[in-house]
Image: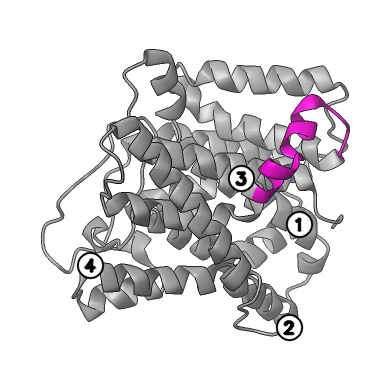
């Protein structure tokens, strides 16, 4: 794999901020709400980006399933996800008071996607759970794709078919605690719990892997990147067209990976956006903890919201510096 692609780190930061605004704001302005209100799609872009980068990093290493390489892969994923995640669980327990041991172990084990959505300690944990499951199966998935020479186009079509069918699937999850207090989103494709959320993640992984494996594919002109970006913005004002946004994001990610200069890349590589990208994982977890406390700093609601977001950014920066960069569970 190449050295770090700063524009992709910046893209992750922009997506984290989009999710943050999505959770904090409900605009009356129709245009703003069409954009901010579709912020849940940023999570799908996270999945696509992870799948793309993992594919370009491990497509040579997972041509054969060697136990040492798979274990090293898992250790790196644990180091990336778990320190900030587990500390956030402890913080939520301290703020919320008593929770059941069953709920604690479900969240600590990152298996929330298989259980009653009421077991989520933090609304964003569903995506960490589904991505963790995808991490577990990724070496075997990539091995089979490479061994049987499954074309990228087939994976992309498979991802699109899953996305189209997903809103029509029945809810699927274990419910040991009795009837769930359902909070299914009315937003098209915003499916944040149960096995369906795992299928949503796998569909995005298909886009990321598929585009990474497209032979000789390259957007030759920077204007093509702008066209894909503009089309993605226009699709935010549709309903059914949203299924294409994760796929379009995969195309943009591949072009950014080539490091061919364009204005989008230059923006994503600016220092503030790059720093935002570095703290994006902490921000993704921290912002909803802050939001759920319903702090009132000032009496003006809009200003109060911006202050809470600023506070979330500050906490995320310290989380990144003190935990993400320093705490490693495994030596690899």
> Which image quadrant is residue 152 in?
top right
**Image quadrant where one finds the N terminus:** bottom right
* Magenta-span inclusion, residue 263: yes
- Highlighted range, magenta: 259-275
Would residue 170 be counted in the magenta stretch? no
Pick the front one: 137 or 36: 36
Mark 2 to mark 1 CA distance (whole Å): 19 Å
Q: Give the foreground label among 3 and 2.
A: 3
Q: Secondary structure at mark 1?
A: helix
Q: Is residue 70 above or below residue 198?
A: below
By secondary structure, the bulk of the magenta-drawn segment is best described as helix
Q: Provide the residue designation for mark 1.
A: 146
Give me the C-alpha separation between circle 3 and circle 4.
28 Å
First of labels 4, 1 by sequence position = 4
At x 48%, y 26%, the residue is 242
Disc 4 versus disc 1: nearer the observer: 4
Q: Check whether the beta carbons of the residues at disc 4 and disc 1 lie within 8 A of each other.
A: no
- Frontmost of labels 3 and 1 is 3
Disc 2 marks which residue?
68
- Say which label, 2 or 4, has the lower sequence index: 2
Instruction: Give the residue number, with chain letter if any, for mark 4.
Output: 96
**Looking at the picture, how far across and down is residue 43, in whole percent?**
50, 44
Residue 135 location (% of width, % of height): 58, 64
Going from N to C along the chain, the mark reached first, 2 or 1, is: 2
**Can residue 60 be seen at all in this image of the molecule?**
yes
Q: CA distance from mark 3 to mark 1?
A: 31 Å
Can I make out residue 166 in this image? no
N-term-proximal mark, 3 vs 1 = 3
Per the image, the residue denoted by label 3 is 13
């Amino acid at each position: 794999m190449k050295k770090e692609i700063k524009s992709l780190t910046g893209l992750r930061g922009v997506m984290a901020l989009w999710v943050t605004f999505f959770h904090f704001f409900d605009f009356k302005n129709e245009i703003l709400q069409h954009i901010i209100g579709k912020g849940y799609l940023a999570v799908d872009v996270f999945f696509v980006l992870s799948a793309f980068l993992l594919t370009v990093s491990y497509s040579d290493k997972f041509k054969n399933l060697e136990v040492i390489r798979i274990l090293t892969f898992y250790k790196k994923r644990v180091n990336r996800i778990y320190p900030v995640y587990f500390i956030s669980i402890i913080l939520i327990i301290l703020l919320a008071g008593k929770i059941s041991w069953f709920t604690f172990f479900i969240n600590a084990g990152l298996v929330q996607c298989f259980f009653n959505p009421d077991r989520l300690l933090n609304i964003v944990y569903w995506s960490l759970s589904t991505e963790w499951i995808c991490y577990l199966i990724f070496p075997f998935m990539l091995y089979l794709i490479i061994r049987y020479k499954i074309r990228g186009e087939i994976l992309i079509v498979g991802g699109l078919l899953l996305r189209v069918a997903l809103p029509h699937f029945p809810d699927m999850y274990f419910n040991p605690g009795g009837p769930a207090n359902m909070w299914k989103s009315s937003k098209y494709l915003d499916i944040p719990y149960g096995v369906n959320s795992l299928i949503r993640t796998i569909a995005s992984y298909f886009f990321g892997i598929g585009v990474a494996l497209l032979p000789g594919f390259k957007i030759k002109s920077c204007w093509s990147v702008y066209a894909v970006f503009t089309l993605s913005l226009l699709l935010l004002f549709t309903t059914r067209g949203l299924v294409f946004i994760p796929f379009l994001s995969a195309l943009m990610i591949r072009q950014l990976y080539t490091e061919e200069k364009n204005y989008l890349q230059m923006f994503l590589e600016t220092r503030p956006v790059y720093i935002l990208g570095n703290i994006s994982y902490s921000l993704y977890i921290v912002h909803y903890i802050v939001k759920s406390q319903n702090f009132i700093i000032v009496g003006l609601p809009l200003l109060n919201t911006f202050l809470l977001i600023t506070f979330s950014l500050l906490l995320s920066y310290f989380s990144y510096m003190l935990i993400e960069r320093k705490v490693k569970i495994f030596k690899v």
